[in-house]
Image (tube, rainbow, N blue to C red):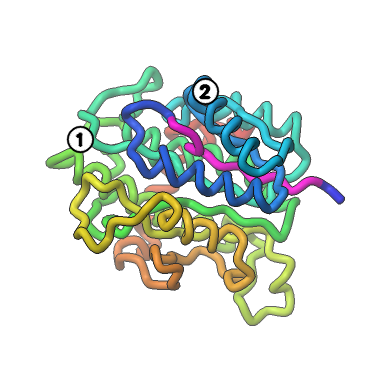
Amino acid sequence: MAAQVREVTGSGPAGACFYNLCLWIGKCIALDLARRNAHVILACRDKEKGQAALDEIRRATGNPSMRLRLLDVSSMASVRDFARQFLKEESRLDILVNNAGITGLPVAPTAEDLEQMFATNVLGPFLLTSLLLDTVKASAPARIVNVSSFVHCKGTVNIRFLTGEEWPKSCTQAYYSSKLMNVVFTIELASPIHCPFSRPPHSPSLHTLHSVHILLEAGPPELEVRPDQFRSAEEGATSTLYCAVSREVEGITGKYFDSDCSLVLPADRAQDPGIARKLWDALEQLTGLRDGGTK
């Protein structure tokens, strides 16, 4: 039987600028998948800290079928290098978890003239998903889990944020907007335009869906979160794992799940097809996909 490949971005400690959600929850996700005897690829920015996470998971699970691959999702060149290496080494991808993210940083350009927070939280995951999408489809039934946040309802989709030409009133508002963009592009990705084999849940082809695109609720503790909303790393990973492996979500695509694993509606603006099309076009252009840069 072909190995089941589960890839988790931001799964190990990735440096001080990565908020605690990625430091802890990503590792918990990888740990759980490793306990299920999955072939897990940890995509981490920091080699030393990523290796430490990998070694810890191997000791805890006894699963030798794990790999560490370097990936800086704020760099489109790094994303392309990672995807190229993945496609050479792996023939399938059953679960892709886009968990990496940053917040609390001032506006700053990357070497590719993108804004660093939006490059990390939006453009990098979009490009990585796009480059691996054919492999995900070929591995059906397979799933893509994009980690968003309940604070997306406070965000704004402004294309000029992506390059830093304009900037929200605060870093917190920038984070809200990046999480809204995650929801918007995920819903758009699940549409028949991009996944033509998708079918509604009642269709006879339910079990032949090529991918499931699911959003879930998560947020860094320094944001506007009530004390009752704080969760341990294990609790925070629960909803991600529910979306990644639960039978209950089979056949569900392009939907938003909260931290209690409940299917809920995202903000109205996240469901606006006009906003989605505008954002999608900008993401394709800024990542080079519009110019045919698919590999």
**What SS does tag 1 mark?**
loop
Q: Residue at point 30% right, 46% down?
A: 220
Q: Residue at point 43% right, 72% down?
A: 262
Q: Position of residue 292 (x, y in %)?
A: 59, 33
Q: Residues within 10 Å of mark 1 (few under 14, many from 20)?
A: few
The alpha-carbon separation of the residues under discs 2 and 1 comes to 24 Å
**Which residue lies under the disc numbered 2?**
77
**What SS does tag 2 mark?**
helix
Single out the residue that lies furthest toward the right: 1
Q: Position of residue 89 (x, y in %)?
A: 75, 31
Q: Nearer the viewer, residue 14 or 228?
A: 228
Contact, mark 2 vs mark 1 (Cβ under 8 Å): no
Upstream in the sequence, badge 2 or badge 1? Answer: 2
- Three-letter amino acid code at disc 2? Ala
- Three-letter amino acid code at disc 1? Glu
> Does the stretch in magenta take in 5?
yes
Q: What is the count of numbered marks? A: 2
Q: Nearer the viewer, residue 222 or 268?
A: 222
- The answer to which quarter of the image holds residue 198 is bottom right
> Does the stretch in magenta take in 119?
no
Q: Does residue 71 sit above or below 182 in this rendering? A: above
Horizontal side of 96 relative to 92 (left or right) equals left
Quadrant, the C terminus: top right
Query: For residue 166, which numbered disc appears in the image?
Result: 1
Q: Position of residue 195 (x, y in %)?
A: 62, 58
Horizontal side of 101 relative to 35 (left or right) equals left
Q: Position of residue 55 (x, y in %)?
A: 60, 30
Query: For residue 73, which numbered disc appears in the image?
Result: none
Magenta residue span: 3-13
Q: Is residue 122 visible?
A: no
User: Mark 2 or 1, which is nearer the eye?
Assistant: 2
